[in-house]
Image (tube, rainbow, N blue to C red):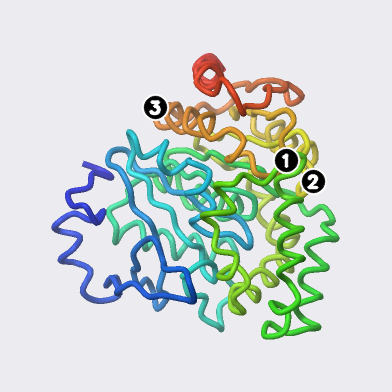
Amino acid sequence: MAGVRRSASGASATNSARLGGAGARAPREHHHDHAPIGEFIAVDGTRLHYLDRGAGTPVVLLHGNGSMIEDFAASGLIEGAAADHRVVAFDRPGFGYSERPAGRAWTPAEQSSLLRKAFALLDIERPVVVAHSWGTLVAVSLALAGPDSVAGLVLLSGYYYPTPRPDAAAIAQGVAMLGTAVAPLLSPLLAAGAVRRAFAPCAVPEAFNKAYPMSRALWPPQVKAVAEEAAMMPSAAQSLSRSYAELAVPVHLMAGSEDRIVETDKHSARLHRQLPGSTFQRVAGCGHMVHHAAPEDVVAAIRTMGQAPPRPGAAGPPAGEAVRRRWLHIGESAAALRRDLATA
């Protein structure tokens, strides 16, 4: 059965036997005061760090630029979705504990190609892919690889069109000027400010402060990856945007009404208008980190997405429709979302 796990490690007996070569798992390693929380698999010459939890229909989580698996763990999304799904969260190449070998462009297409190979090694078939921010470009690239690649997309606070991002340009230029060895020495205060800006207008949750390894986020190879992805973001979005109309899987978009990182109207709302069969949830009073503000709504979207057939031409909710902010009464709002998606 697709996506069913037969061992506590997340791999079937057949899969475990198969992981002796390019897909062999490596032992855990430690860096400073933080240890990786998942396992490793070697794919096409690149070692990827991943966390595998739960059982059932597979769900893949892809983080944004500068982030890592712990972001999803701190939000409660992994725990919530793993109650009735197999959830596999990856550190994308160059982030967390995943490698980013030199000599490759590491565009969304390059990353999606690597992930498809990882899916095969880990027996992940047609997952629902949940992606945040820069990771949405990789998720879209996965879906464009073919209708059998993924079952559906849940896209959070994504950047989809080549609009100017002065902050991203500043990051890329700053690292280019200072170098990856010097930039982390100057960046702890800047990083703290960036985190506050990402969550604004909401406060940074204590769970995030406790679980997110900022020392790892400021590790020179990750700083370099951040700069590379910031620099390529407009061109990557421009290239992918030519193919959005070809998406043949269900798409659910979520974004905060007060996002100060990516403008919701220019990206999520615009993509919703371009994809007649998509659904769109604007989380009122929330910034860029919608999976922290409304994790139960993301889980509700995953559950509905896993059951929904492709619906080309279906009309989603109006692009301007707002959904009230979900810090309290989450169960009630998740039920409402399930009704909305079922009738969309």
> Sequence order check: which comes first, mark 2 or mark 1?
2
* Whole-percent x, y for residue 241 in the image: 69, 49
Nearer the observer, disc 2 or disc 3? Answer: 2
Residue that numbered label 1 is attached to: 287
Q: Secondary structure at mark 3?
A: helix
Residue 260 — which label?
Answer: 2
Q: CA distance from mark 2 to mark 3?
A: 33 Å
User: Would you say 198 lies left or right of 131 here?
Assistant: right
Q: Amino acid at mark 2?
A: Arg
User: Residue at coordinates 21% horizontally, 52% vertically from top-left?
Assistant: 8
Given the image, on which type of amino acid does mark 1 rest? Answer: Gly
Q: Quadrant of residue 191?
A: bottom right
Mark 2 and mark 3 in contact? Answer it, CB < 8 Å.
no
Give the percent coordinates (x, y) of residue 308.
43, 26
- Which residue is nearer to you in this view: 26 or 191? 191
Mark 1–mark 3 Cα distance, whole angstroms, equals 29 Å
The disc placed on residue 307 is 3
Q: Indicate which disc, 1 or 3, sits on the residue closer to the N terminus.
A: 1
Residue 268 lies, with reference to residue 226, above or below; the image says above
Q: Is residue 40 left or right of residue 160?
A: left
